[in-house]
Amino acid sequence: MCCLFGLVDTRHSLSGREKSQILHILASESEARGIDATGVAYNLGNQLYIHKRPIPGHKLQIRVCNDTAAVMGHTRMTTQGRASRNKNNHPFFGRVDGIPFALAHNGVLHNETGIRLRFNLPQTAVETDSFVAVQLLQSYGAVTPQTIAAMAEQLEGTFTFSILTSGNDLYLVRGNNPLSVWYYPATGVHLYASTPEILAAAVI
């Protein structure tokens, strides 16, 4: 059991400090679903940044800027791959046709070995089942609704994904694991997390 969380502020209604405070609350509340590691991904200028550490959510320092439009986060309960090896923690970095993206997964996949064999995907230093989703998207050569759907259709197990591209496209893919999205019309801000109880703690 892990947790996805994040926000979308395309109108730039909130300051960087306000967004950082909300993300800190979400990360802290998400500890209910995992404390082994915490990470976030966001764009700054034309560069995609991933900041992750093998620490609980409340200990991760999250600082984003005023113009940060989308942030995706993850807290981890380890099922495969030691959290002490930061490569195993989410979000993961991927690249398609020179364009970077980040991916986080909540769930457990049962057929990653079969997928790697069927698609001739290379072994990597990442020890988690989740990373096969990154590899599949890279093998498809694009991050689009169509390739994300194709990736999800190959998977057996439980999953919900968040995927952020360097173009600030944020995709949320709900399989058979929970995900809640709340919209605040006054600001145009969306918040999301694996459960509504986590979202209830972050007041805008």
Image: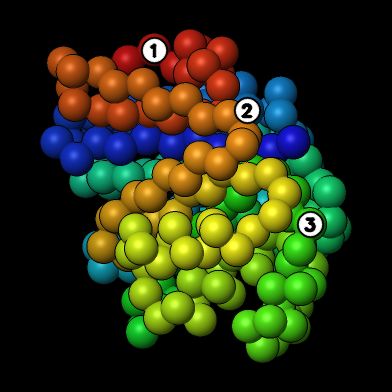
Whether residue 55 is visible here, answered yes or no, is no
Dot label at residue 203:
1
Give the vertical position of 203 relative to 22 (above or below). above
- Dot 2: what SS? helix
Q: CA distance from mark 2 to mark 1?
A: 15 Å
Mark 2 neighbour class, 10 Å CA radius: few under 14, some 14 to 19, many 20 or more: many
Coordinates of residue 13 in the picture (x, y in percent): 17, 29
Q: Amino acid at mark 1?
A: Val
Asked whether disc 1 touches disc 3, contact meaning CB atoms under 8 Å apart, the reply is no
Nearest to viewer (mark 1 / mark 3): 3
Alpha carbons under labels 1 and 3: distance apart = 37 Å
Q: Residue sitting at 69 percent across and 38 percent down?
A: 2
Residue 132 in view in this figure: yes
Reading the image, the residue beneath label 3 is 110
Q: Quadrant of residue 15?
A: top left
Query: Disc 2 or 1, which lies upstream in sequence?
Result: 2
Marks 2/1 in contact by CB < 8 Å: the verdict is no
Circle 2: residue type: Ser
Residue at 74% across, 36% down: 1
Q: Is residue 202 left or right of residue 131?
A: left
- Residue at 26% across / 68% down in the picture? 46
Q: CA distance from mark 2 to mark 3?
A: 24 Å
For label 1, the SS is loop
